[in-house]
């Protein structure tokens, strides 16, 4: 099982899209392991986007991410990192395919609704930035055996 860090960005919150975006992940079978509605500080935004420091869009990105509250989620599932990335779609709303979150809900290249970790390493780093260990909850879903085939002992 993987856990990935998702951020519903300020535009998703301001446009009232939180519920519809979370529903897509729940419908897919991903499990919410953590959730936090918060205002990101400039320091946290800088740590989160450290790889982009110096790029032309960096200052605008930090100011966007700190401009209004966000909803931070930890989503769990087999292959959760790449599943969430495909569900998000391409970075730019103008290029993202229909059927993806960015493709269906936005047109902007910078206000692109959602962040998702892009690798196992970045998921670990980003989860630690946004959640205490005790805030990530291990819990049993009632319907787990109908979401995954558990007959072999490992989820298939
Ligand atoms: P990702 O969010 O799809 O992983 P990254 O390349 O990691 O895309 O960029 C991080 C964020 O920075 C994007 O989600 C977007 O909000 C913003 N961004 C990236 N490239 C541009 C750009 O060329 N113009 C404006 N904003 C950008
Ligand atoms: Mg990225």
Image (cartoon, rainbow, N blue to C red):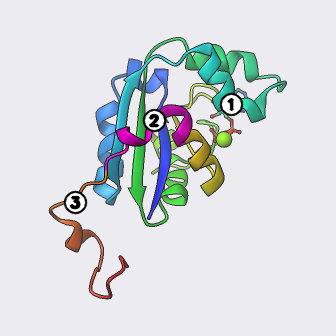
* Front tag of 1 and 3: 3
Q: Are marks 1 and 3 in contact (CB under 8 Å)?
A: no
Instruction: Tell me which segment is drawn in magenta.
Output: 127-137
In primary-sequence order, the first of circles 2 and 1 is 1
Residue 9 is a magenta residue: no
Q: Is residue 106 visible?
A: no
- Where disc 1 sits, the SS reads loop
**Above or below for 79 versus 88:** below
**Residue 142 image label:** none
- Disc 1 Cβ-to-ligand 1 distance below 8 Å: yes
User: How far apart in space, not on screen, are marks 1 and 3 (Cα)?
Assistant: 33 Å
Q: Residue 91: which quarter of the image?
A: top right
* Front tag of 2 and 1: 2
The residue depicted at 28 percent of the width and 80 percent of the height is: 150
User: Which quarter of the image is occupied by the C terminus?
Assistant: bottom left
The residue depicted at 73 percent of the width and 31 percent of the height is: 50
């Amino acid at each position: 099982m993987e856990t990935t860090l998702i951020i519903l960005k300020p535009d998703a919150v301001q446009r009232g899209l939180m519920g519809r975006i979370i529903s897509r992940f729940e419908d897919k079978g991903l499990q919410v392991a953590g959730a936090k509605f918060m205002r990101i500080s400039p320091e946290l935004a800088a740590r989160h986007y450290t790889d982009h420091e110096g790029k032309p869009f960096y200052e605008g990105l930090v100011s966007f991410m700190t401009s209004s509250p966000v909803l931070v989620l930890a989503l769990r599932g087999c292959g959760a990192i790449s599943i969430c990335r495909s569900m998000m779609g391409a970075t730019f709303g103008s290029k993202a395919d229909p059927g993806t979150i960015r493709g269906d809900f936005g047109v902007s290249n910078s206000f692109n609704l959602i962040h998702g970790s892009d690798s196992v390493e970045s998921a670990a780093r980003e989860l630690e930035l946004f959640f205490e260990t005790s805030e990530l909850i291990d819990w049993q879903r009632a319907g787990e055996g109908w979401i995954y085939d558990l007959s072999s002992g490992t989820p298939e």
